[in-house]
Image (tube, grey):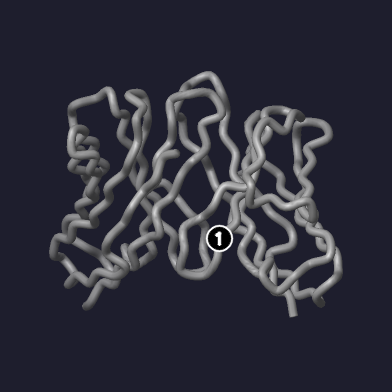
């Protein structure tokens, strides 16, 4: 199965440290999304890429957050100087353009705990 | 900005019975898509059913069907013959038909299935 894969699945870090998450989308999916989900809440949009271009960023994405998709394939989400409020699940998703409204597929998420 | 509201934080259903989960949304757009996603505990979010706003016919997928009321901006999910495996968090989501169409999620409804 070549679904959306995320790594690591779980990360515990000390406040102030930097963390990086990686997402590998479904092959040939040119759109890639990052969402954040806290316990008991729905996912909140962070940013999305079409190929290597970052086309939209949410106001939730503070300057401590940076996302890249250098070759239009995998993506990384880095959080610098982590804070306890960053503790959440970070979801990656992908889709393919060409058919408006087509399905967005999600990965299993990367859990971040900041202590 | 579009918003999605799920007014039922938690629902319970007896195995083999039918349950309906509610969702309302707010938008000024005419071209959009609506989705129900299922997220089992600690597992991947998967698509249950989708509805195109331009279609009058309600979508169905096996035991899952929707009641789409465009004028009322309502999009409920009916699960028939509930099974233990249906227990999960269910999210209603909206997606604009415009380019850059990210998903906007509701807060979710926890569905418990009793045997």
The one of A40 and A16 positioned closer to us in this rendering: A16
Label 1 element class: strand
Provide residue B33's location: percent of width, then percent of height: 37, 33
Residue behind mark 1 = A37
Q: How many marks?
A: 1
How packed is label 1: few (under 14 Cα within 10 Å), some, or many (20 or more)? some
* B98 to A34, vertically: above or below: above
Q: Is residue A76 left or right of residue B81?
A: right
Q: Is residue A1 in view from this perspective?
A: no
Residue for point 35% across, 47% down: B36
* B35 to B13, vertically: above or below: above
The C terminus of chain A appears in which quarter of the rendering?
A: bottom right
Quarter of the view holding residue A12 = bottom right
Provide residue B29's location: percent of width, then percent of height: 36, 27
* B29 to A19, vertically: above or below: above
Q: Is residue A9 in view from this perspective?
A: yes
Task: List the single residue furthest toward the top.
Answer: A98
The one of B82 and B13 positioned closer to us in this rendering: B13
Q: Label 1 is found on which chain of the structure?
A: A
Residue for point 36% across, 48% down: B4
The one of B1 and A16 positioned closer to us in this rendering: B1
Provide residue B81's location: percent of width, then percent of height: 17, 59
Residue for point 35% across, 35% down: B27
Residue for point 69% across, 68% down: A112
Quarter of the view holding residue B12 = bottom left
Provide residue A66's location: percent of width, then percent of height: 79, 48
Task: List the single residue furthest toward the bottom.
Answer: A115
Q: Is residue B68 left or right of residue A86?
A: left
């Amino acid at each position: 199965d070549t679904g959306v894969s995320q790594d690591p699945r779980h990360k515990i870090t000390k406040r102030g440290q930097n963390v990086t998450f990686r997402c590998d989308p479904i092959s040939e999916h040119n759109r890639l999304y990052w969402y954040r989900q806290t316990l008991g809440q729905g996912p909140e949009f962070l940013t999305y890429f079409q190929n290597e271009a970052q086309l939209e960023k949410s106001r939730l994405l503070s300057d401590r957050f940076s996302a890249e998709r250098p070759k239009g394939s995998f993506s990384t989400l880095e959080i610098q100087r982590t804070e306890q409020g960053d503790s959440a699940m970070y979801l990656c998703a992908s889709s393919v353009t060409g058919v408006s409204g087509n399905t967005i597929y999600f990965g299993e998420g990367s859990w971040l705990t900041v202590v | 900005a579009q918003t999605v509201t799920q007014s039922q934080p938690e629902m319970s259903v007896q195995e083999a019975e039918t349950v309906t989960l509610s969702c309302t949304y707010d938008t000024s757009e005419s071209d959009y898509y609506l989705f129900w996603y299922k997220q089992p505990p600690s597992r991947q979010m998967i698509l249950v059913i989708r509805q195109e706003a331009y279609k009058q016919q309600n979508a169905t997928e096996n035991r899952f069907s929707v009641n789409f009321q465009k004028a009322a901006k309502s999009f409920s999910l009916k699960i028939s013959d509930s099974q233990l495996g249906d227990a999960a968090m269910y999210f209603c989501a909206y997606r604009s038909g415009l380019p850059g169409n990210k998903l906007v999620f509701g807060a979710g409804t926890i569905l418990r299935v009793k045997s």
